[in-house]
Image (cartoon, grey):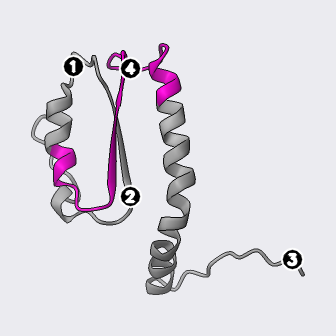
Amino acid sequence: MINSVPLIEPDDFSLCPVLLVHPEDDRWTPVKISKLFFDKIKAPKKMKILQNAGHFPVETPGIQQLESECINFIENGIQSVQPMIAAVAIKHDIPLLHNDKDG
């Protein structure tokens, strides 16, 4: 695993928006290591540092911050990714679902 290579290099990745949530007190993976990778990502991106959280943020307040940030990212990102989803669907001839009140 130490010699693994990403399928798409971060500086070539533009498929979808990226949210990186990283625990502030992570002793296994320092924030600066994740930030090196994060800074290379070409796609729209956001980084949130989970205050007072360790490597596996299941404790308070990390878990609440993680949950809140993920929900906000999804809710705020839906509008911004709709054109991207449509473009991919058209490119790959995938029918789009729509809200049809008449059935």
Residue topped by disc 4: 56
Residue topped by disc 1: 28
Label disc, if present, on residue 17 of the rendered structure: 2
Q: Residue at x 16, y 53 (%)?
A: 40
Q: Is residue 1 visible?
A: no
| Pointer 4 or 2: first along the chain | 2
CB-based contact (under 8 Å), mark 3 and mark 1: no
Secondary element under disc 3, as helix, strand or loop, is: loop
| Pointer 1 or 4: first along the chain | 1
The residue lying furthest to the left in this view is 3
Q: CA distance from mark 3 to mark 2?
A: 30 Å
Residue 25 horizontal side relative to residue 76, left or right: left
Residue topped by disc 3: 101
Q: CA distance from mark 1 to mark 4?
A: 10 Å
Residue 43 horizontal side relative to residue 33, left or right: right
Of residues 100 and 45, the one nearer the viewer is 45
Q: Amino acid at mark 2?
A: Pro
- What is the x, y in percent for residue 21? 36, 35
| Pointer 3 or 2: first along the chain | 2
Q: CA distance from mark 4 to mark 2?
A: 23 Å
| Pointer 3 or 1: first along the chain | 1
Q: Is residue 94 magenta?
A: no
Secondary element under disc 1, as helix, strand or loop, is: loop
Image height of 43 relative to 5, above or below: below
Q: Is residue 37 visible?
A: yes
Dividing the picture into quarters, in which one does residue 1 lie? top left
Q: Residue at x 55, y 61 (%)?
A: 78
CB-based contact (under 8 Å), mark 3 and mark 2: no
Magenta part of the chain: 37-65
Secondary element under disc 4, as helix, strand or loop, is: loop
Secondary element under disc 2, as helix, strand or loop, is: loop
